[in-house]
């Protein structure tokens, strides 16, 4: 028995009971999430976004999130996060341990959740997306699944979560650094399109 997946499923059910009543949601395009390894990439505007990414994922899958390492500094929370398969990443450097963990998650057939912007944003294009998700997709062949979560979340007002079609990064062959960055921008543009917001062109300065 996979204890991490069991704990993840139980915790997801508990949290969903609360959010389903207070901040209801509806998921569109869930069928776009394939069996096998995949990387879910979403915009990030609110602390609750990881919950909604999990809610958008079918129950039978285990979503392992890459989260900022600061969340793990409080040991009880860190232990809980690790217990459900979430793992830390140092956003200020090339974190090889996080990369190795991400590769292991995908090789085990699970889903990997990443917020390419690396932090919560207040406006589209506020920060340039990091290319980590694209690099991982290139190394593993796992598809990237764009996912849109609305910025505005009002009490008792249903929000619309949209899952896009898989992106095959490997189809373009070996990518240069510039191509990795450009593909990361394309991922964010596809996410914006799912929410019918303006695509972000170019990288933030």
Image (cartoon, rainbow, N blue to C red):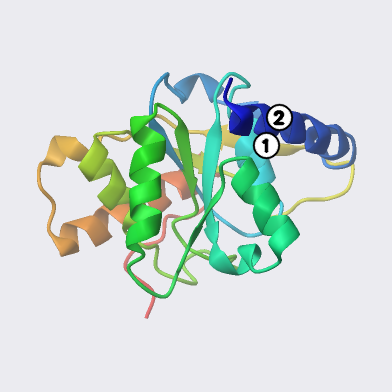
The residue under the point 73% across, 34% down is 12
Above or below: residue 168 compared with residue 83: above
The percent coordinates of residue 122 (x first, y second) are: 62, 69
The percent coordinates of residue 128 (x first, y second) are: 39, 68
In which quadrant of the rendered view does residue 59 lie? top right
Left or right of 77, for residue 19:
right
- The residue beneath circle 1 is 160
Between 196 and 146, the one lying in front of the other is: 146
Q: Secondary structure at mark 2?
A: strand
- The residue beneath circle 2 is 26
In which quadrant of the rendered view does residue 131 lie? bottom left
Between 37 and 85, the one lying in front of the other is: 85
Neighbourhood count class around disc 2 (C-alpha, 10 Å): few under 14, some 14–19, many 20 upward: few
The percent coordinates of residue 92 (x first, y second) are: 42, 75
Q: Quadrant of the N terminus?
A: top right
The residue under the point 55% across, 57% down is 67
Question: Dots 2 and 1: beta carbons under 8 Å?
Answer: yes
Above or below: residue 89 compared with residue 64: below
What number of labels is visible?
Answer: 2
Q: Quadrant of the C terminus?
A: bottom left
Left or right of 107, for residue 146:
right
| Residue 123 in view of the camera | no
Task: Specify the farthest residue to the bottom.
Answer: 205
| Residue 152 in view of the camera | yes
Neighbourhood count class around disc 1 (C-alpha, 10 Å): few under 14, some 14–19, many 20 upward: some
Please tell me which of labels 2 and 1 falls first in the chain: 2
The residue under the point 55% across, 65% down is 69
The percent coordinates of residue 140 (x first, y second) are: 25, 37
In which quadrant of the rendered view does residue 185 lie? bottom left
Q: Which of the labelled discs sits on residue 75, or is there none?
A: none
Q: Secondary structure at mark 1?
A: strand
The residue under the point 26% across, 61% down is 181
């Amino acid at each position: 028995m996979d204890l991490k997946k069991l704990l993840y499923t139980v915790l997801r059910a508990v949290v969903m009971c609360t959010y389903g009543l207070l901040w209801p949601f509806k998921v569109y395009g869930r069928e776009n999430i394939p069996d096998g390894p995949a990387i879910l990439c979403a915009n990030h505007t609110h602390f609750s976004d990881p919950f909604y990414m999990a809610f958008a994922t079918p129950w039978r899958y285990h979503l392992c999130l890459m989260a900022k390492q600061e969340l793990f500094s409080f040991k009880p929370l860190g232990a809980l996060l690790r217990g459900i398969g979430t793992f830390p990443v140092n956003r200020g450097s090339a974190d090889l341990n996080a990369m190795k963990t991400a590769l292991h998650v995908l090789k085990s057939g699970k889903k990997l959740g990443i917020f390419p912007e690396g932090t919560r944003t207040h406006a589209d294009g506020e920060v340039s997306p990091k290319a980590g998700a694209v690099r991982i997709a290139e190394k593993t062949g796992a598809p990237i699944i764009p996912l849109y979560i609305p910025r505005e979340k009002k009490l008792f007002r249903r929000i619309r979560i949209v899952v896009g079609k898989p992106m095959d990064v490997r189809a373009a062959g070996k990518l240069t650094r510039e191509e990795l960055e450009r593909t990361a921008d394309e991922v964010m543009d596809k996410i914006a399109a799912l929410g019918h917001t303006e695509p972000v062109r170019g990288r933030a300065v």
